[in-house]
Image (tube, rainbow, N blue to C red):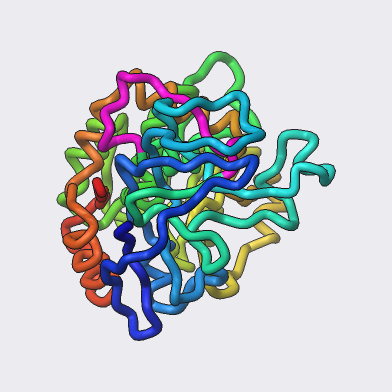
Amino acid sequence: MRAIEFDLEGTASVVDIPYPSPGPEDVVVQVLSTGSCGSDLSALRGTHPFRFPPLISGHEVGGVVTEVGEQVDDTVVGQRVVVEPQRFCRTCEYCTTGRHNLCPKKQMLGIAEWDGSFAEYVRVPAYTVLPVSGRIPDYALALVEPLAVAAHAVRQVRATPEHGRQPSHLVMGGGTIGALVTAVLQHVSPGRVTVSEPRGQNSDMLKAMGASDVLQPDAVSDRGELFDTVFVAAGHAPLVAEAVRRCAPGGTVVQVAVFNTEVPVPVGELQVQEIAFVGTAMYTREDFDVAAELLAERPDIAELMVTDRMDLAEGAEAITRMASHGPGTTIKLIMEP
């Protein structure tokens, strides 16, 4: 079968690899859609903390089950599913209490030891698949995973305002995750959502996702406004201190973006203002349920987010280009093998 391989020279190319056979507790999924994200680009550059080329990358995926292992009894051939791309031990304290995203033995789909979804078929444990509504278009299935990241981030908010006031939120970064955080906020905690984003071409999309205001970063600082919750959704180190400055006393800063270097955090301000600073680690099944529900209710999210739809060969070229030169006008790249 065809798959995209990342090599040590920073090139993604289509190769032939063996078709995956399911183990006793596995299923094989024919990939209908798989999305490229920032972690794939950093893996191709050789800067990702645990995705090391050569490998078959990809972890945002949905498709149709084509084979099931002999011990699988709750998934059937022909089911339309998305994959929660975490392989965990299922026996530790975190796994048995529904927090498998914190499992110390967890592996992510798309590492060298577990071929990812940039392929025609992918093998995954049966416990990772989730049946989904037919209201979600095939090409949009891959968006459930990043939506689950956003849903998990929104669940970290510590408290809502008193006296019946609607909450105010600031999302710092209006790329894929920032846009999806905006949509989830309006789904589960409606209020005023301001998005700080330097790329003007994203403004209309962000407003359609639910943003009340889309401002340049300097404009947010100039206003001096404080927000109940601030989400750091772009991996730009100075945003962390700015997020604390923009958070109201007693509020919450939620760190969603991935940083590959140490980032200073103004702990004195956190203490004096009693601000909660919360990190996020992937998602749980509850977050996938929220994401799938939201995308079924709002399939327009896919229309707003997905700027590029390609086959594997086109996708390999685009990923190589984006890893070297940046995303350009691409918001979300989806491949349909």
Residue 111 appears in the rendering:
yes
Residue at 35 percent of width and 35 percent of height: 141
Q: Is residue 155 above or below residue 166?
A: below
Q: Is residue 273 something one can see in this rendering?
A: no
Q: Is residue 315 left or right of residue 158?
A: left
Question: 162 left or right of 146?
Answer: right
- Pick whichever, 34 or 298, lies toward us: 34
Residue pictured at 50% horizontal, 44% vertical? 230
Is 223 in front, or is 299?
299
Q: Position of residue 289 (x, y in %)?
A: 52, 26
- On screen, residue 98 versus residue 115, left or right, reads right
Question: Residue 326 occupies which quadrant of the picture?
Answer: bottom left
Using the image as rendered, state which of residue 177 and residue 319 is in the foreground. 319
Q: Position of residue 163 (x, y in %)?
A: 58, 15
Return the residue found at the far top. Answer: 164
Q: Residue furthest front?
A: 70
Q: Residue at x 27, y 67 (%)?
A: 14
- Give the residue displayed 45% in from the left and 57% down from the top: 116
- What are the residue bounds of the magenta stretch? 125-141
Q: Residue farthest to the bottom?
A: 9
Which residue is at the front of the view, 170 or 248? 170
**In the image, is 269 to the left or to the right of 79?**
right
Q: Position of residue 306 (x, y in %)?
A: 22, 43
- Image quadrant in which you'd find residue 138: top left
Q: How many marks?
A: 0
